[in-house]
Image: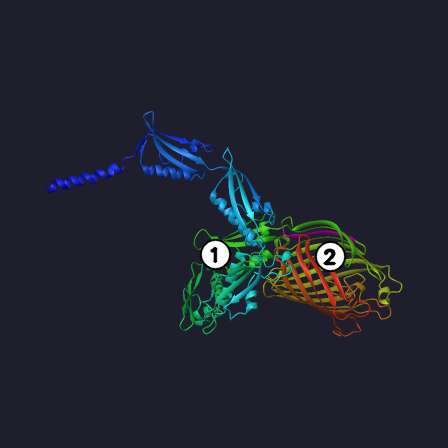
């Protein structure tokens, strides 16, 4: 009996899967409801076919495959009997085709700007997910513009041809600006310190023009992270910056922002050690970290130390060295122990240097700035310096240098990708200069002529008081050697108050780099000049210069430039020392010496402080007088602002003519701050001091002072300066202030 029962149970268990597995034998598959999608395109994705038995799970998989096409909003599968044959019918409902998109209610943001934000295009299949993303993008844009309460919805009208018109309906609401930002729980930093850490600002009376005070959720989130970072740098490793509490006031026109900070306690550095692959003694490696036991913990200094240790390894070819700082925080002792785990990885050499993105610039122009060559050990410091050198060329908007694995673990490739900027300019026009009066000009300048790095300049300007014609070409790497060679031809005619000067000449330049940051340059100049139209009542010093003369001189210049980015420096210095000796033939015989130095210091929030000084001395060695136009005249935008050009220095006491000095010294102190970063516009405040002295005057006998402010803009036409200087000690006949502008190189 027991055996019979067991046999019966076994048969039931064996038969149940067969019953469950019973499906349908499909004689044919029919697709219905498709309009734009071809039947075969649907059949091709089905995981089943006619003439086979299918299970319900197979039909479910087929439905999912059809949905994945993204073209249908509804899919129904049914098994029907037609003419004695089982038919599997898929009834489809296609998503409408978006034929048009429109916006309603947008007044503050233009339609063409909103169209760039939405992710659904025309024509395209209606996708609810993309519609939702587009709604979020439009609303976020309104929040960025200060419309915190803006509401955005989208609806679709489907026509008889299954075409859809999608309408984004926008209720902009009122512009909401931040009226007040307050902090709670802060003791380490006061309100002003915390505000300095933030980009979000409270509204002010010019918010309608500048947008200051507009609420931006993303910007505020970044501000909270920045505040937390500053606490970490002061040792408050348990700080918590809470999400801001926002309150709408003044009939929803303004908002109050309250940021609560849980500062907790300050932590100090406990033990510091290093382990792993040590290429130097542990103490020597830890000396690179600017943190010692007992110091206040600082995440900023910790990152700096990790970078220094990583560079130590990378400078010896260990490009893949991994330096991991492990921290152990002891809340009882308020100490943070540091352990640097170091994996040096394989020592690698440079296999290939690849240059891309340069459409007109030749590869060699980029490669010759590299401090690494193929075949030598990798060096991180040399790679950083290479990037700075390429950037300083001024040919590229962006320079991106990355590394990639070579053919094996012991080789590395350096990939240089550049984005070229226009280096040639053509301009023709007219304007009014505060120095030269009405000026017409035309010029062609190419800083990267033929993509070889040559500098070509063709220029002409004609004004009411001056005219200039000039052509020049300079090759900084003549014949691919470390040799600079160039020439210049010019003709100028300038009218001053008491005389006019006409000059025609040319110059040949030869130089070479000396070390990494220095260069020597020799320039031979030959010039024929005329001093004419001398005022009969002018100073005797001026009248004695009337007539023709020639200059044949050679100038030797030593320059050293350690600035970080030469077109717009923020740190480093630039030094020039030159000696011009005239007397290699010609009628003029003199020696002129110039020393010039400028240094830049980065300050806070993108600001820069700079100090500039110049000292000059000239003397005649075989004639009685120094040539009139080789003397020193100060004043104007390139020396002492707030004074008229060439009207600071010795004066003839009888005629009150400016006769120039044989020595000069002046200093410029400037503080530059960003006004519009995207436009390259900066503001500047300055203080100038200096003078020029005659042969019968002592050096530094008297100083002239000025101060002022201005705007500097890297405009499409070139660097532009607009500066107002105030004369701090005006003498009789001098103006109290001067407003000057210039388009050209910064001094």
Q: Is 364 drawn above or below residue 554 in the view shown?
A: above
Magenta run includes residue 345: no
Residue 546 occupies quadrant: bottom right
| Tag 2 secondary structure | strand
Where residue 70 appears, as percent x and y from the top left, is 45, 39
**Label ID, residue 403:** none
Q: Quadrant of the C terminus?
A: bottom right
**Label ID, residue 507:** 2
The residue nearer to you, when weighing 627 against 227, is: 227
Q: Quadrant of the N terminus?
A: top left
Residue 632 occupies quadrant: bottom right
Q: Furthest residue to the right?
A: 536
Where residue 469 appears, as percent x and y from the top left, is 76, 53
Tell me if I can see residue 358 in this picture: yes
The residue pinned by badge 1 equals: 349
Q: Is residue 744 left or right of residue 297?
A: right
Where residue 683 appears, as percent x and y from the top left, is 66, 61
Q: Is residue 240 left or right of residue 110?
A: left
Bounds of the magenta segment? 452-462
Where residue 493 appears, as percent x and y from the top left, is 80, 56
């Amino acid at each position: 009996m027991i055996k019979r029962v067991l046999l019966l149970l076994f048969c039931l268990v064996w038969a149940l899967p067969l019953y469950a597995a019973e499906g349908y034998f499909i004689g044919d598959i029919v697709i219905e409801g498709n309009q734009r999608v071809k039947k075969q395109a649907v059949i091709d994705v089905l995981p089943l076919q006619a003439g086979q038995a299918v299970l319900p799970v197979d039909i479910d998989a087929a439905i999912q495959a059809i949905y994945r096409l993204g073209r249908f909003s509804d899919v129904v599968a049914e098994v029907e009997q037609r003419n004695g044959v089982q038919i599997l019918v898929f009834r489809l409902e296609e998503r409408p085709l978006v034929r048009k998109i429109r916006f309603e209610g947008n007044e503050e943001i233009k339609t063409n700007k909103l169209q760039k934000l939405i992710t659904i295009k025309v024509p395209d299949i209606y996708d609810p997910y993309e519609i939702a993303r587009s709604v979020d993008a439009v609303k976020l844009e309104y929040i960025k513009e200060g419309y915190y309460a803006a509401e955005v919805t989208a609806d679709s009208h489907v026509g008889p041809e299954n075409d859809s018109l999608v309408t984004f309906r926008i209720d902009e609401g009122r512009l909401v600006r931040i009226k007040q930002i307050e902090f709670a729980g802060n003791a380490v930093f006061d309100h002003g310190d915390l505000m300095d850490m933030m980009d979000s600002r409270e509204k002010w009376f010019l918010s309608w023009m500048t947008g200051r005070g507009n609420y931006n959720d993303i910007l505020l989130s970044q501000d909270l992270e920045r505040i937390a970072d500053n606490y970490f740098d002061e040792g408050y490793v348990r700080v918590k910056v809470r999400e801001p509490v926002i309150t709408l006031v003044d009939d929803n026109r303004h908002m109050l922002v309250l940021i609560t900070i849980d500062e907790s306690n300050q932590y100090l550095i406990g033990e510091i050690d290093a382990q792993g692959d040590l290429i130097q003694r542990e103490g020597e490696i830890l000396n690179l970290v600017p943190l010692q036991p007992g110091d206040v913990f600082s995440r900023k200094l910790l990152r700096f130390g990790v970078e220094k240790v990583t560079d130590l390894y990378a400078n010896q070819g260990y490009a893949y060295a991994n330096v991991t700082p492990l921290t152990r925080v002891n809340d009882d002792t308020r100490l943070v122990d540091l352990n640097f785990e170091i994996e040096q990885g394989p020592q690698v050499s440079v296999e290939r240097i690849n240059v891309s993105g340069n459409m007109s610039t030749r590869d060699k122009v980029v490669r010759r700035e590299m401090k690494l060559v193929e075949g030598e050990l990798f060096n991180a410091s040399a790679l950083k310096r290479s990037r700075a050198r390429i950037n300083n060329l001024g040919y590229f908007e962006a320079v991106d240098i990355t590394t990639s694995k070579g053919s094996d673990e012991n080789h590395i490739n350096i990939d240089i990708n550049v984005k070229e900027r226009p280096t040639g300019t053509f301009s023709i026009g007219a304007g009014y200069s505060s120095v030269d009066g009405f000026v017409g000009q035309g010029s062609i300048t190419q800083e990267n002529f033929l993509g070889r790095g040559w500098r070509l300049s063709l220029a002409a300007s004609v004004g009411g008081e001056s005219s200039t014609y000039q052509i020049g070409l300079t090759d900084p790497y003549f014949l691919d050697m470390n040799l600079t060679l160039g020439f210049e031809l010019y003709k100028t005619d300038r009218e001053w108050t008491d005389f006019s000067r006409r000059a025609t000449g040319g110059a040949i330049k030869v130089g070479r780099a000396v070390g990494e940051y220095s260069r020597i340059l020799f320039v031979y100049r030959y010039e024929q000049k005329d001093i004419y139209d001398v005022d009969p009542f002018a100073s005797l010093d001026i009248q004695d210069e009337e007539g023709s003369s020639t200059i044949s001189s050679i100038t030797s210049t030593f320059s050293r430039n350690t600035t970080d980015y030469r077109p717009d420096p923020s740190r480093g210095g630039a030094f020039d020392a030159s000696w011009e000796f005239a007397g290699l033939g010609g009628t003029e015989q003199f020696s002129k010496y110039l020393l010039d130095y400028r240094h830049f210091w980065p300050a806070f929030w993108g600001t820069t402080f700079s100090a500039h000084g110049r000292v000059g001395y000239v003397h005649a060695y075989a004639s009685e007088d120094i040539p009139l136009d080789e003397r020193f005249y100060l004043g104007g935008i390139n020396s002492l602002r707030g004074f008229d050009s060439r009207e600071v220095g010795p004066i003839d006491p009888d005629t009150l003519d400016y006769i120039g000095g044989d020595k000069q010294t002046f200093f410029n102190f400037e503080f530059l701050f960003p006004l519009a970063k995207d436009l390259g516009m900066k503001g500047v405040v300055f203080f100038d001091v200096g003078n020029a002295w005659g042969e019968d005057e002592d050096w530094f006998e008297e100083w002239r002072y000025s101060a002022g402010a201005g705007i500097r803009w890297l405009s499409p036409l070139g660097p532009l300066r607009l500066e107002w200087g105030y004369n701090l000690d005006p003498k009789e006949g001098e103006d109290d202030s001067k407003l000057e502008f210039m388009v050209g190189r910064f001094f």
